[in-house]
Amino acid sequence: MTQPCYALVDWGTTNLRLWLVDADGAVLAERQSAEGMGNLSTDQFAGVLETHLAALGAPADLPVMMAGMVGARTGWVEVPYAVAPADLTTLADSAFDVPQTARPVAILPGVCQTTPLPHDVMRGEETQLAGAVADGLVSAVFCLPGTHSKWAIVEDGRLSRFATVMTGELFSLLSRQSILRLTIDADATTEPGMPEFAEGVRQGLRPGFALSAELFSFRAAALLAGLTPTSAAARLSGMLIGAEIAAMASQIDNNATIYIVGSDRLTALYRAGLSHAGLACEALDGASLVRKGLFAAARLKYGRKN
Amino acid sequence: MTQPCYALVDWGTTNLRLWLVDADGAVLAERQSAEGMGNLSTDQFAGVLETHLAALGAPADLPVMMAGMVGARTGWVEVPYAVAPADLTTLADSAFDVPQTARPVAILPGVCQTTPLPHDVMRGEETQLAGAVADGLVSAVFCLPGTHSKWAIVEDGRLSRFATVMTGELFSLLSRQSILRLTIDADATTEPGMPEFAEGVRQGLRPGFALSAELFSFRAAALLAGLTPTSAAARLSGMLIGAEIAAMASQIDNNATIYIVGSDRLTALYRAGLSHAGLACEALDGASLVRKGLFAAARLKYGRKN
């Protein structure tokens, strides 16, 4: 195979994804694993990385560029945050060189926000955004749905402002660990066309929506009106997505196209939710974006090797 | 001792409280226990009740009036709900006679709400409200803070409308089981005078407050600005109480005095929260109210025995 130029690693809380790419960023080989930051102690990261590189036959001096929770306080080494507004084209300038590695290994900084408040942080999403910027999307609104959804405003290649919404984690907590677990099938598959989903979205979008005051009705409707666990899951999912969109819509230009970066399943749900809110959107591929962001950073950091 | 006239039992999810009272409702003896509905299977209730009655030397034919989750689907026997608007002075007419007991044992109905929506249910709180009505408070707004806070509007002795807010459960889920557990001391004691509590209340009261969008800032502020676990607990507590008050204030006459029925600790926090919202309040003693509600029901059901 063509000699790889860099190894790129998206190392999050629950997964790692590694690519060997050539000088143009084309993928030569890749690996995925569930050895996420959350499952590793500090002294395990180096070994895990080298195992995956060896499995792909990577040269001993191949430089590595990484992003994500690997740079968190509880990761391999803590990498100081870049501060928003942050230039996404030069994140590599603040990449942190992991000490005592046999090969060059760098971790990109996450980004923190302190002004304007509220405080917020991201690690990994900034590299997806950098990939979008590298792709030419230099000014846009992004929505990255997930456990902790991120919304970001990028202007002229700079991440100017962002916000985190705990939509996915709330769905999981409420459907698995609250009293609503008796009423909601946490593992049900919600389809964007389900009427209960649409009803939930409309509820979450309503001005004056108050989450804590609208949750117990799921339990009561199950007791009194036969609300099924599958319908309840769809309605809760819609409600939380609607509430997220309502909260974020108040902070963005409502004529802007929102670029969704997420799994196919979440993208379909958010697309439906945004459409209920009258907002335009387009979907981008997250894995491809993070790879592009890492590649751009590797080129800046290590230069064009071959 | 004077011969008791009735045994009164407030039997909730986590506790039971039992009183022997005379013909005027004066307490002759009482017992408390952690043998709540949640810890018992259906066939254990009769034995637990008789054990406590025997420990107090209650006569074998002493009639018993009960209220609370003992009448839930997962309790001793499922007692059908009374339907709101519900007359709180005649709940005893719908009391359910537990079959196959050696003595008369009745359970008061909970109350359900189906119109106007949202669906809601209560079991136990209606008996506290009946006690307030028996005490002469026939028209008032009540706030019963807790795991599932209840707000109720009583008009001329009728429970006309109520709502449940999952404030306590959300605090517990977020501070113990979400990512915020790393940031919030779930067991910290929040005092109503703490500035972080007041700040949280103001945040929750703000128009447009969106819970899911404001939670992650606790984590970020801990990482970036040294927010301590104790301060974070106070702020989250205030935020959830503020959000509850904001949601409920939109549904009540804002000139009404709100009668708080809860523990001393919660009463102090809600009193502070209501004061931030410019709402007047007064505290009532919940244990005394439920006993009065049970006593009024026992008199109606069993007659004045001695």
Image (cartoon, coloured by chain):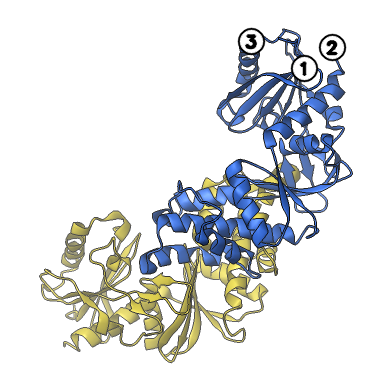
Chain colours: A blue, B yellow
Report the Cα–Cα distance between label 1 and label 2. Answer: 8 Å
- Considering only vertical position in the picture, is B17 above or below A294? below
Q: Which residue is under mark 1?
A: A22
Identified at 73% across, 34% down, the residue is A289
Q: Which residue is under mark 3?
A: A54
Check chain identity for marks 3 and 1: say if they share one.
yes
Q: Which residue is under mark 2?
A: A306
Circles 1 and 2 in contact, beta carbons < 8 Å:
yes
Give the camera-side residue of B223 and A104. A104
Circles 2 and 3 in contact, beta carbons < 8 Å:
no
Of circles 3 and 1, the one toward us is: 1
Check chain identity for marks 2 and 3: say if they share one.
yes
Q: Position of residue A70 (x, y in %)?
A: 67, 28
Report the Cα–Cα distance between label 2 and label 3. Answer: 21 Å
Check chain identity for marks 1 and 2: say if they share one.
yes
Picture quadrant of residue B224: top right
The amino acid type of the residue labelled 1 equals Asp
- Chain under label 1? A
Of circles 2 and 3, the one toward us is: 2
| Among numbered discs 3 and 1, the one appearing first in the sequence | 1
Q: Residues within 10 Å of mark 3 (few under 14, many from 20)?
A: few
